[in-house]
Image: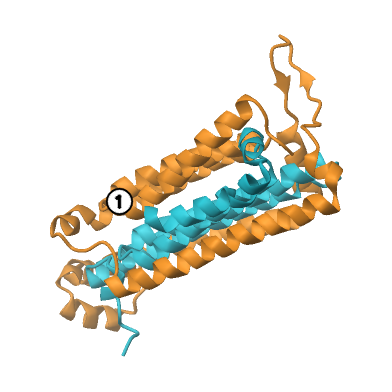
Amino acid sequence: MVLSGWEAVFFWIFSIAAIFAGLLTVMARNAVHSALFLISSLVSVAALFVLAGAEFIAGVQILVYVGGVMVLFLFVIMLVNVGAEERGNQPTMNKPRQVTTSMIFCLLLVLGLLFAINVGYRGLQKRNPTAAAQLQDQTLKPGATGTTNITTDTQRVGNSLYRFAALPFEIASVLLLVAIIGSVMLARTLKQEAAVDDLAPDVLAAESAREPELAGVTATAEEIE
Amino acid sequence: MLTLFAPGLIFLFQEESRSGVMLESIKNPDLSRFLMIGALLFVIGVGGVLTRRNIIVIFMSIELILNAANLNFIAFSRYLQATGNLNAVAGQVFTVFVIVVAAAEAAIGLGIVIALYRNKETIWIDEIDLLKW
């Protein structure tokens, strides 16, 4: 697997964009800026996926991450009202000593990872020299106009997903269902919990003595009784 | 932060410049370049998790880490395709599951953030210390 020509140029452009956007995600003071930088980092990584021949995953990445998860992030940032806390000139990082320790740890981690990749990849090339140096061997069928080639990536991923990973696929859908229900349950207010008769009447009475916002709910509950 | 990664970036090309194939490696990036980009993104994410105080930015850094792992999966999948491996799309299939888990994690995590903000009125992690004594 070796990229060449314009593919290499775009590889470097998008990888540098991904790394810089990632750095700015971590460094930005405002959480909204962080979210926007993270979006550009994710889009750059999606472009790298396209360069690696995974068009379906690139599409899923943009649809799910940028379209779904990041919108959720932005909504939550708006809900918890970060702006008010940012304006108070609070430090965005931990205490200096903690930051120094983490930086040293990250430095060691990056050195170790790059060393491992260098050594490991050279070993891989030595073990299998033809495969590592092999150029792009995919022969794609040309499209109707002849200017582009048709990729079969989505077809192959779907085939593999349903043939070899049907049970994990179903488990993943159950996981998503649980996540939806769990987040709805977590984000409910006390008033909403009381409003769906989740609390026993005596607990509700005790709670409404403490929480003034529950007074209306108890009144309606008594009216019903 | 930039000074942190400068030695790593020098190290990135150290070996190649010695043997004179650095330019070749930049002109024709291969599997190891994908892995290096993934490693750098991963370390940036780890740094974000360890240094930031804002819990939402910590969640974003976790997304960055998961994305770096996805990049590695895709790169290896492509590498195996080039070597003619039969079930080379397994990496892409696994990436789909990673994305699913990331979406579920984000939904649950942000639900917890909202519940936390409602009860503690804060998103700074050093002020969330109920379990610390």
x then y, percent, for residue A58: 59, 38
Of A214 and A71, nearer the camera is A71
Quadrant in which the C terminus of chain B is drawn: bottom left
Chain to which the residue tagged by mark 1 belongs = A
- The residue singled out by tag 1 in the image is A28
For residue A197, say whether it is visible: no
In the structure shown, which secondary structural element does the residue marked by tag 1 occupy? loop
Identified at 64% across, 48% down, the residue is B18
B129 sits left or right of B93 in the view: left
Mark 1, Cα crowd under 10 Å, few <14 / some 14-19 / many 20+, is some
In the rendered image, the residue lying farthest to the bottom is B133
Of A126 and A58, nearer the camera is A126
x then y, percent, for residue A190: 28, 69
Q: Is residue B107 above or below residue A9?
A: below
* Chain the render paints cyan: B
Identified at 61% across, 31% down, the residue is A8
* Chain the render paints orange: A
A4 sits left or right of A89 in the view: right
Of A170 and A217, nearer the camera is A170
A51 sits left or right of A128 in the view: left
Of A88 and B18, nearer the camera is B18
x then y, percent, for residue A91: 22, 63
Q: Is residue A115 above or below residue A8?
A: below
The amino acid type, in three-letter code, at marker 1 is: Ala
x then y, percent, for residue A213: 17, 68
Quadrant in which the N terminus of chain B is drawn: bottom left
Question: Which quadrant of the view contains residue A209?
Answer: bottom left
For residue A11, say whether it is visible: yes
